[in-house]
Amino acid sequence: MDLILEGIKKAFCLLVGLDPEVMGITLLSLEVSGAATLISLLIGISIGVMVALSRFPGKRIVVSLINTGMGLPPVVVGLFVTIFLWRNGPFGMLGILYTPTAMIIAQTVIASPIVMGITLAAIQQLPQKLRLQILALGATRFQMVWILIKEARLPLLAAVMAGFGGVISEVGASIMVGGNIKGYSRVLTTATVMETSRGNFDIAIALGIILLLLAYFINLVLTQIQQRERPR
Amino acid sequence: MIESSPLLEARNIEVERGGTIILSVQSLLIQKGEILSLIGPNGAGKTTLLQTSSYLLKPFKGELFFKGEKINSNQSIFEYRRKLAMIFQEPLLFDTTVLGNVASGLKIRGMARGEIRHRVMEQLDRFGIIHLSGRSARTLSGGEAQRASLARAFAIQPEVLFLDEPFASLDPPTRDSLIEDLENILRKTKTTTIFATHDLSEALRLSDRMAVMNQGKIFQIGSPAEVMNHPIDEFVASFVGVETILSGRVIKKYKGTFLASILGQEIEVVGDVHLGETVVICIRPENVTLSTSILKEATSARNMFTGKILKIVPLGLYQKVQLDCGFPLIAYVTNHSLDELSLAEGKEVKASFKATAVTVVRRGEDFKNNS
C-alpha cells in the first residue's frame, strides 16, 4: 500500500515540477504518434476513398483485408518492420532500426488500416445517389471526392482519433523497433514498461497518468463528435 | 410543320444490366423550352432514361446530341453536365446550411463570392425559403429540403432540367404547393425540362408532351390530349385511364360554373376560372349517360349533346362507347343498358353528363393547344 501511495506522491511532484525527462518522453510520444497518424491519414483516407468509390473484381477481398488489418497485432507489425530494417535485411543500409523513424514507420503501419477501414465505411454509408447528385452539379471527379470527404467529415474525424488512440498507447512494436533508448527513442509506453520492471513506481505512475490523460482527452473529443445530433 | 433543331437528341439508346436490356429507345427529340414527362409504372425505365440522357449513367449504347453536337469525349460530357441540373426524389442536400447548399453548384464552377451570393438569394426568394438560409440542412422538413434542392439546381441556370419523381415522397399539400411553384418557375424561365413521375395528374398538369414508358421502351409520346384520347394500345390506355380530355377557352362565367368552348360546342363545367382563360377538362367515362331520347327540361344534367357512336369496345363488365359529339367523348355503358337501348356503331344517341362530372385538370395562359 505504502508503495502505491509513495508512488503517487512522487508522481505528482514530477508532473507538477515538470521534470525534464518525463516531459521529454511525453513530447517524443506526441511527435512520433502524431507523425504516424498524419502519414496514416494521407495513406488511409486516399486508399479508403478509392476502394469505397471503385468497382473492381476482388473488391470484397480487399475490403476484408483492410478490416482484418484494423486488428493487426502490433507485435507482428514490430516483427516485420524489424526484419525489414535489420542490418542484413532489405532496408538495412538505411540504418534506421532503433530510431524514432522506425517507430513512426511501425506506427504508421498499425494506424493506416484503421483509418482506411473507417474511411471506407464512412464513404460507403453516404447515400448512393449523392455521388450522382454531385456529378449532376457539374463537379469534376476530384471535386466530387473532396465533397464526399467533407460530407463524411465526422466519421473521418473519428478515424483520425481512432488511429491516434491506437498508436499512442502501443508498446510492442515501439519497443521492438525503437529500442527504448534514453532521450532518443523512449516514449511513454516503452518507458512505463522499463520503469515498472525496475520498480521505479513513482516515475511509472507519472507516465501512466499522462498516458491516461491523453487517452481520456482523445475519448472526450470523440464522444463530443459522436454526440452531435444527426437527424436524417 | 418545320421544327427547329432539337436541344437534346437521343439515338438508339440501349442499356443492359445483368444480361437484360433495361432501356431501349430508338429516338427521342427534345425541343428547347418544352416540358416532357416520362410516365409509367415502377421499373418502366424512366430513371434509366433520365440518367442516360444526362450522361450520369454509363456505359450505354447509342448516341446523345446536345444542340446538334455529339457528346462523346470526356470533355464534351463534362461540358454538357455543367449545363444541366438533376433533381432526385430525395433532396440529397449537403451537411451545411441552406445557403451553402444552394451555392454549391456555383462554388463548383468557381464563381465569385459576390455573384454567388446574389444568385443564391434570388433562388431562395423564388422558392420561398429565404427565411431558412442560415439553417442547417439537417433540420429541414421534406418540403423545405426539396425546395432547397430545386433552388440549388436553378442557381446554376441549367439549360436542361431533369427531375426524377421529385414529389413522390411528399405529402399531398406540400406536393401541390411545390408543383404550383415549380410550374410557375418553369413557365417563366422556359427551362427545357424532362421529368419522370408515376403520377398521371402531375404529368397532365406540367407537361407539354408525355411519354408513356414500360419495360424500358417508350410506348407512346405526344401531347397529353393526344395520349389520353388516342392511346395507341391497351397498355397505354389502361395506364392513362382512357378519359376524355379536351382543351378549350372559357367564354362565359356563371355562379360557380363556367362555359367552355370546345371544338364549336359549349360545355358547362363546375369551377372558378377567368374569362378567356384556356382550360383543359376531363370527363370520366363512367359519368357519361347515354339515352336514345330525353327531354332537356327533365334532367339536371347541364350538358347534353347529340352524337354518333363511332365504336363500341367490350371491356368485360361494361362497354366503352366512343362518340363524336363535335368533340370526342367516351362513355362507359353496362352491357345491360347497351342491350336495352340497342346501341350500335353508327347510331345517333344523346350523351349527357353533369357539370359536376367534369374536372378542370389544368388551366393557364401558356398551355400549348394540341387537339
Image: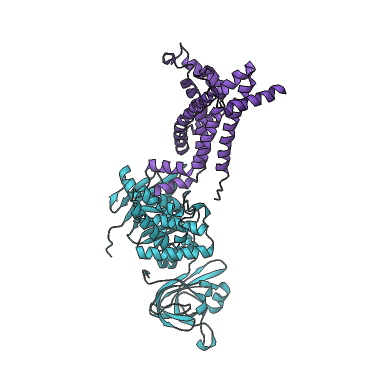
Chain colours: A purple, B cyan
Residue A115 is situated, as x and y percent measured from the top left of the image, at 50, 33
> Residue at 40% of width from left, 55% of height from top?
B153
Q: Nearer the viewer, residue B293 or A38?
A: A38
Q: Nearer the viewer, residue B246 or B203?
A: B203
**Furthest-right residue in view?**
A1
Q: Quadrant of the N terminus of chain B?
A: bottom left
Residue B366 is situated, as x and y percent measured from the top left of the image, at 36, 70
Q: Is residue B325 above or below residue B113?
A: below
Residue B40 seen from this side: no
> Residue at 33% of width from left, 54% of height from top?
B8
Q: Quadrant of the C terminus of chain B?
A: bottom left
Q: Is residue B144 above or below residue B294?
A: above
Q: Nearer the viewer, residue B359 or A47?
A: A47
Q: Is residue B299 above or below residue B11?
A: below
Q: Nearer the viewer, residue B332 or B164?
A: B164
Residue B134 is situated, as x and y percent measured from the top left of the image, at 46, 55
**Furthest-top residue in view?**
A88
**Furthest-bottom residue in view?**
B297
How many marks on residues? 0
Picture quarter containing residue B232?
bottom left
Residue B255 seen from this side: yes
User: Is B290 left, or right, of B77 in this rendering?
Assistant: right
Residue B213 is situated, as x and y percent measured from the top left of the image, at 44, 56
